[in-house]
Amino acid sequence: MPKKKEKGRAASNPDTRRIKTLIAAVEEALKAPVIETASLTKIRDGYLALHRDDKPSFFSLLLDRGEVRPEDLIPLTEDAREARKDPALWRNLMVKLRSGVESPRWRLFRQFISLPGGLKFLLDLRADILAAQHQGAPDLEPLDDDLKRLFESWFQNGFLFLKEITL
């Protein structure tokens, strides 16, 4: 007699179909020049549907698939070596280099602020990353760093204003 699927699954038995579907949605969004709201909603909803035990597997794939590729960055660093004697060329190359080293994940995360509840989603995502690290998941520091940098850029002194709300 087949066993019924249990609500709580062991971490060693992740729902690979659901994780692969979610990673495919992330990869599709990252390929687009502009990440559409529908894509962000699909990713958010897919993530929220993951079981807690599936999240470390998703995070590992997100680290691998949402990273700057060496073949995109190495030519820029080689061009930088050649451009160091030409100030105008150097400045233009630095713009390309800064853009080139930006994590595609950071670009994706940054877009979630446009969704209703997007900030809460990102805060909860970071809490899940920290929890997974605490439970012994492989190094997820690059994901955490992407989110920390994003929050720091949004919540710098001078951008937040606290006002007392009165009648």
Image (cartoon, grey):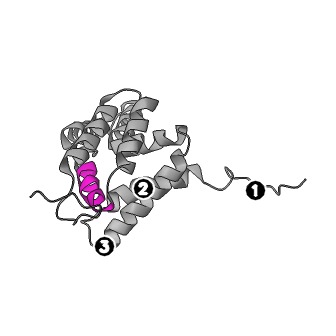
Pick the front one: 34 or 119: 119
Mark closer to the chain start, 3 or 2: 2
Residue drawn where x is 27% and y is 57% of the image: 54
Q: Amino acid at mark 1?
A: Leu
Real-space Cα separation, disc 3 to disc 2, in angstroms: 15 Å
Please rate how many residues cluster around mark 3, counting C-alpha atoms within 10 Å: few if below 14, some from 14 to 19, many from 20: few
Is residue 59 located in the magenta-colored stretch of the structure?
Answer: yes
Is residue 51 located in the magenta-colored stretch of the structure?
Answer: no
Q: Secondary structure at mark 1?
A: loop
- Which residue appears farthest toward the left when viewing the image? 1
Residue drawn where x is 42% and y is 55% of the image: 125
Please rate how many residues cluster around mark 1, counting C-alpha atoms within 10 Å: few if below 14, some from 14 to 19, many from 20: few
Task: Determine whether 133 is above or below 85 in the image.
Answer: below
Residue 55 found in image quarter: bottom left
Q: Secondary structure at mark 2?
A: helix
* Residue 54 visible here: yes
What is the quadrant of the N terminus in the image? Answer: bottom left
Q: Which mark is residue 135?
A: 3
Please rate how many residues cluster around mark 2, counting C-alpha atoms within 10 Å: few if below 14, some from 14 to 19, many from 20: some
The dominant secondary structure in magenta is helix
Residue ID for mark 1: 162
Q: Tell me the magenta residue range.
A: 52-63
Q: Amino acid at mark 3?
A: Gln
